[in-house]
Amino acid sequence: MNLDPQDCQECDRLVSQYEAATFVQVKIHNQLDIACRLRDRALTRRLTLEAYEITARRTTAREALARHRQSAHAAVKQPDYALAAR
Ligand SMILES: [Zn+2]
């Protein structure tokens, strides 16, 4: 399978997953910033844990996308002569 990443549903799905995690991460960091300013220790603690979780989820999503692109679309970026030489 070496279709164009532009037409790939799996790429769309993985990119959406990554973007959603990025969005949540920004939101949590903003809330964390506010909790710190308010010196709300309990909330700061809870949000810090959430920030770790979402960072891990975002990293996993990014790695899944990279792995998929490598296996499904690796040949797309290569010039024609590289394929012909095999
Ligand atoms: Zn794809």
Image (cartoon, rainbow, N blue to C red):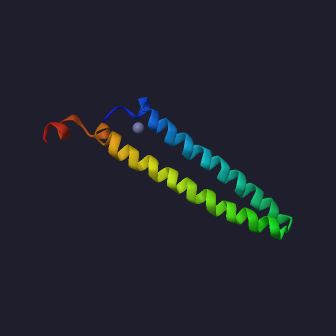
Instruction: Please state which of residues 78 and 16 is positioned toward the viewer in this rendering.
Output: 16
Q: Please tell me whether residue 79 is drawn above or below residue 36 in the rendered image.
A: above
At x 43% / y 31%, what residue is drawn?
Answer: 6
Location of residue 79 by image quarter:
top left
Q: Is residue 36 visible?
A: no
Give the percent coordinates (x, y) of residue 51.
66, 61
Outermost left residue = 85
| Residue 33: image location, x then y, percent | 76, 61
Q: Residue at x 86, y 65 (%)?
A: 38
- Total number of numbered discs in the rendering: 0
Residue at 39% x, 45% y: name it: 68
- Report which quarter residue 8 is drawn in: top left
Would residue 14 be seen by someone viewing this image from the given angle? Answer: yes
42 vs 37, nearest the viewer? 42
Q: Give the quadrant of residue 37.
A: bottom right
Decide if residue 22 is on the left or right side of residue 43: left
Q: Position of residue 40 (x, y in %)?
A: 85, 67
Left-right relation of 53 to 62: right
Q: Quadrant of the N terminus?
A: top left
Work out which quarter of the rendered image holds the C terminus and state it: top left
Give above or below for 12 relative to 40: above
Question: Hey, which residue is sitting farthest top in the picture?
Answer: 7
Residue 75 is left or right of residue 11, and the answer is left
The picture quadrant for ligand 1 comes to top left
